[in-house]
Image (tube, rainbow, N blue to C red):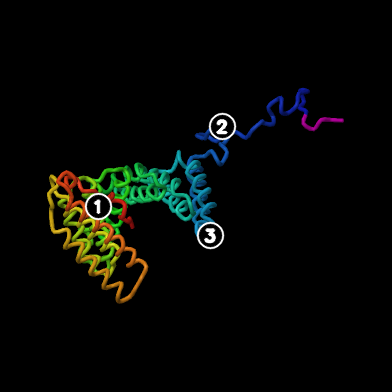
Amino acid sequence: MTDPFANKGGGSAVESGAIPLSAPAVPGESTAPSPPEHLRPGAAAAAARRLAGIAAIRLADAPAAAEEQLRRALVVGCGELDGRELAQLRTRLVTAIAAQPDRDRDLARAAATAAACWQPISAADAAHLWVVAGRAWARAGRHAEAVTAFDRPLVTDGVGYPAGELALVRGEFAESLMRLGRYRQAAWQFTEAARLIAGTPAQRRLHADLVWSAAVARECCGQESEALGGYLRAAGLWGELGKIVPRARCLRAAAWLQLRGPGGRIRGPWWITVDVLMAELNRLQAAEPAAHIAEELARTRGQFAQMCAQASGPAGDRAVPERTDPLEWWRPR
């Protein structure tokens, strides 16, 4: 049979070059094969954006699935996405983790990473994310990490929150400082938080609590005169709000500090402070008996007896009057 592709010289048409192996090159174009689509420049960024789009759709009903897609997007796009897009993806990851229960440690880590990404781009966004990290660490009981996170935006006043929200954040910062025994710094943060909302009708309860907390912190760090003034002021604020339990605790704390002055000397009329409190508790119990009032009345009578015994004892006994730990009756928010 005759080979239709054989040339007259006996060789095949391909061997002789009559039929080229490939199309002739176009002048100015490379003859190298094109790379696969997923390896072309910009393909990784496009894939990361598609994954982020899927995550946005899943966030409301399936935050765990959204988290998975966002983590994939960060891996895929890390080499091609610019700093702002990467920071935005990390912020979305924070949102996805925050929507899931019992993820405080993961949330704190993700927020801290996102804050670091935003730092050279937007100081305001970075500050907010450091606060998110601090709050999450505090909820997880990791107060050293919480203080480190809070310290970045709050010490430099880098958080542009409304006064009420900023007061809450400073209060949380101060509570973590208290847990670490850094009472002087905690007192300053509590005091600054209270100042932010002083005179705000909607924040009266928070204001009273912050004033009380500042007094506790000042007593813990040895600023007893300032603590005494703080307890009396907080007691007045709680009285205006009709909250007898915290008022009673503040007045008893004040009475102990009045009894325990420098060098064992009496600092103020502690007996009057306690007498006023007992009269108020007796009046409330007579008007409307309640278990919490009876409990505070019994506690006040017991501590009054201790104070009387110490005040009337020998001079050596009066030198350092006994007192319960100032943190014992303090209740963080």
Question: In the picture provided, is 2 more to the left or to the right than 221?
Answer: right
Residue 266, percent across and down? 13, 52
Depth check, mark 1 against mark 3: the one in front is 1
Quick one: 61 or 106, which is closer to the camera? 106
- Which residue is rendered at x = 36% and y = 42% of the image? 145
Regarding mark 2 in the picture, which secondary structure is present there? loop
Q: CA distance from mark 1 to mark 3?
A: 44 Å
Residue 92, percent across and down? 44, 52
Residue type beneath disc 1: Val
The earlier-in-sequence mark between 2 and 3 is 2
Residue type beneath disc 3: Asp
Hey, which quadrant is residue 213 in on the image? bottom left
Depth check, mark 2 against mark 3: the one in front is 3
Question: On the image, numbered disc 3 is attached to which residue?
Answer: 61
Report the magenta residues as a range: 1-5
Regarding mark 1 in the picture, which secondary structure is present there? helix
**Disc assigned to residue 216:** 1
Question: On the image, numbered disc 2 is attached to which residue?
Answer: 32
Quick one: 183 or 188, which is closer to the camera? 183
Quick one: 46 or 220, which is closer to the camera? 220
Please rate how many residues cluster around mark 2, counting C-alpha atoms within 10 Å: few if below 14, some from 14 to 19, many from 20.
Answer: few
Residue 321, percent across and down? 21, 48
